[in-house]
Image (cartoon, helix red, strand yellow):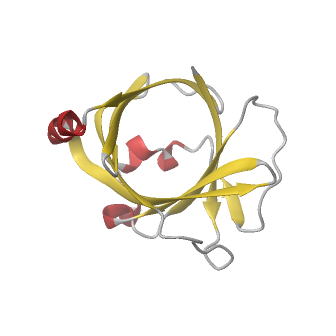
């Protein structure tokens, strides 16, 4: 499957959560630029995700639900530190936006992502969008697991 997404910094003076969000913890077994392997725990569910090299705003993404106890074991094998964040989901003009409020070593970072069906798909940006960072590797979660936002 091909993942096509755009990523943006969020103006927290204009955006605020509409609910309690969902906590996510994710760790990385590989952060190689050719392939990223991630373990994610969200509530009582877990996934193993493999992502290929990014080309523009697209990349191969394969995701598999795995048992929670296996995810916890895999999490202990991850390098560096896990990414902790709360995810909020909003539908705006028929598009699903995921807004991630990062915690711990990435505290202060708030990113919004929107998945597209085509790289050229038009997106009406909400008024709380600041800057597009889709192609800036520093905002990839795998990078943030090794180079925390609070150390920039």
* Side (left or right) of 151 relative to 74: right
Estimate the x, y position of residue 43 in percent, counting from the top left. 34, 52
| Residue for point 81% across, 53% down | 93
Residue closer to the observer: 53 or 1: 1
Whether residue 122 is visible to the viewer of this picture, yes or no, is: yes
**Residue sitting at x 38%, y 62%:** 106
**Quadrant for the N terminus in the image:** top right
The percent position of residue 59, horizontal first and vertical second, equals 57, 25
Q: Position of residue 67 (x, y in %)?
A: 25, 33
Figure disc tally: 0
Relative to 100, does residue 65 appear above or below in the rendering? above
Residue at 82%, 35% (x, y): give it: 121
Q: Which is nearer the eye, 34 or 41?
A: 41
Q: Is residue 101 left or right of residue 42?
A: right
Quadrant containing the C terminus in the rendered view: bottom left
Q: Nearer the viewer, residue 19 or 149?
A: 19
What is the quadrant of residue 90 in the picture? bottom right
Closer to the camera, 142 or 21?
A: 21
Q: Is residue 40 visible?
A: no
- Expressed as whole percent of the image width and height from the top left, the position of residue 115 reads 66, 39
Q: Residue at x 43, y 46 (%)?
A: 141
Residue positioned most to the bottom: 13
Is the residue 13 above or below the residue 72 in the image?
below
Does residue 94 appear left or right of residue 144 in this picture? right
Q: Horizontal placement of 41 versus 113: left or right?
A: left
**Above or below — where is 142 with respect to 20?**
above
């Amino acid at each position: 499957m091909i993942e096509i997404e755009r990523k943006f910094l969020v103006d927290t003076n204009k955006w605020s959560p509409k609910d309690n969000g969902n906590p996510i913890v994710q760790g990385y077994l590989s952060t190689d630029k050719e392939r990223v392997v991630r373990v994610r725990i969200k509530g009582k569910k877990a996934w193993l995700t493999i992502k290929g090299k990014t080309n523009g705003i697209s990349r191969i993404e394969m995701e598999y639900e795995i048992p929670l106890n296996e995810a916890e074991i895999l999490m202990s094998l991850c390098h560096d530190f896990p990414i902790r964040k709360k995810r909020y989901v909003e539908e705006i003009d028929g598009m699903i936006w995921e807004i991630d409020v990062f915690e711990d070593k990435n505290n202060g970072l708030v990113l919004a992502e929107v998945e597209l069906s085509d790289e050229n798909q038009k997106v009406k940006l909400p008024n709380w969008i600041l800057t597009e960072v889709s192609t800036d590797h520093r905002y990839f979660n795998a990078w943030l697991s090794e180079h925390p936002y609070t150390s920039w």
